[in-house]
Image (cartoon, grey):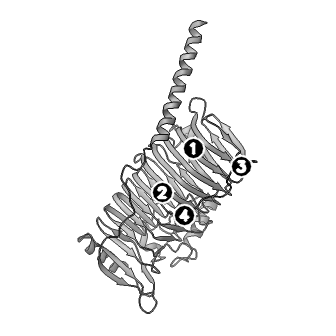
Amino acid sequence: MKILFYRNVKKNFFHTIFIIVILFFHNCGYAEDTRSITEPVIPKICKTLIADDNKDYTTEINNAVISCAKQHKVISLMPSNNGDTHFYSGPIIIPSFGGILINKKVILSAINDPVLYDKGHQTCGVLDDIGKGCNPFIILKGENSGLYGEGYIDGQGGIILKNKKYTWWQLATEAKISHKKQNNPHLININSGHNIIIYKLHLINSPNFHIVSYQTNGLTIWGIKINTPADARNTDGIDPSSSQNITIAHSNISTGDDNIAIKAGNNGESKHITIINNNFGYGHGMSIGSETNSGVNDILVKNLTLQNTTNGLRIKSDITRGGVVTNIHYENICIFNVKNPVVLDTSYKDNIKNKEKNEEKNIPQFKNIFFKNIKVLTPGTLKFNGLDEENMIEIFVNNFHIKNGSSWIKNNVIIHGNIDNIINNDICTLY
């Protein structure tokens, strides 16, 4: 009995020390973007183009961008003296040290012809079982390239497509009904980029995801506004995928899917990401997943207001795409009129057939998830759904308050700290 007693004392002692150490590091610092980030500066301009509402600018923009990139300068898009504001273009590729400054009132619009974005298999603009038949409207490549200005990039998701009878968004809706995949272009892709900047722009009406970074090390998104209708399917705001050293700051995002979704599929982990001083309108919330099989770690989400989103703070995965999600910090979060304020779900869209087929399962593990200074101002459902007793969700809470009338779903979760109903200030701060 004495041996058993001392074993239990020893076990509890070290468990307590572990929690103290974790909370100490939580309060002292974060493993966020490892770069030192300040507000971006617009590079020097080497060429100015003037808007013409009736012209196709695809070739002229691409040629000018390539020419100016050799001088480490950007091109500038300006409205005309007679009131023209549009630059219509097909796909644009921005190489290292290149960029586009889109000035106030200017609208850079994606020409609504699926043929322009097709990857060569004549599938862009139709349904199939894959959904990867389109190139994006804009690709940022290499290092030190960017998009700048207070103008607009318009994906024209709600405009009837050339030689079709439907829009990009209608195609996405039909895909859901028919259990197919839509072939719609992303608005902006960053491919294997380094120190890329997207600054102050308005992104509207994307046919699909707005910004996706693939295997990128160094991305600053600062002061942008994303505004695409709430019913435009699969129009994620910003999706860092298998990327690191990313800062998303001072931005407002309203869209038809995840406002932000951090993903880590088969091409590498996502880590060292700072999301600070942002506001979310409608959308599906601040998400991690559902692809987490390569791992997601060292994420800071700070000073965020979510109003009218479907979900608030969400980590989603399942055994077909799960991995380790750890060292995630949420701090100074205000949630208002949100159906599901917090969702940590290891059984997101589980596919029973895939479970049976896959001998090697990708087990989702959510560990060291920290919540500090969280206010949920309206009743909603909080869901903590761990996989099983061997793969428990572990969270640490400090100053976490929820509105009376909220409901809970708790399975296989360890919660360190208390969540209460004491709310002294029922107003969200806008950042």
Image point (52%, 52%), residue name: 302
Q: 355 or 81: nearer the eye? A: 81
**Measured along the vertical axis of the image, is residue 137 above or below residue 397?**
below
Q: Which of marks 1 and 2 is in front?
A: 1
Q: What element carries label 4?
A: strand
**Measured along the vertical axis of the image, is residue 60 above or below residue 314?**
below
Q: Which of marks 4 and 2 is in front?
A: 4
Earlier in the chain: of badge 4 and badge 2, it is 2
- Give the residue at mark 2: 239
Image point (38%, 56%), residue name: 37
Q: 317 or 171: nearer the eye? A: 317
**Measured along the vertical axis of the image, is residue 394 above or below residue 429?**
above
Q: Distance between the residues labelled 3 and 4?
A: 25 Å
Res. 359 visible in picture: no
Q: Is mark 2 on a helix, strand or loop?
A: strand
Quadrant position of the C terminus in the picture: bottom right
Residue 371 numbered tag: 1
Residue type at mark 3: give it. Answer: Lys
Residue type at mark 4: give it. Answer: Ile
Earlier in the chain: of badge 3 and badge 4, it is 4
Earlier in the chain: of badge 3 and badge 2, it is 2
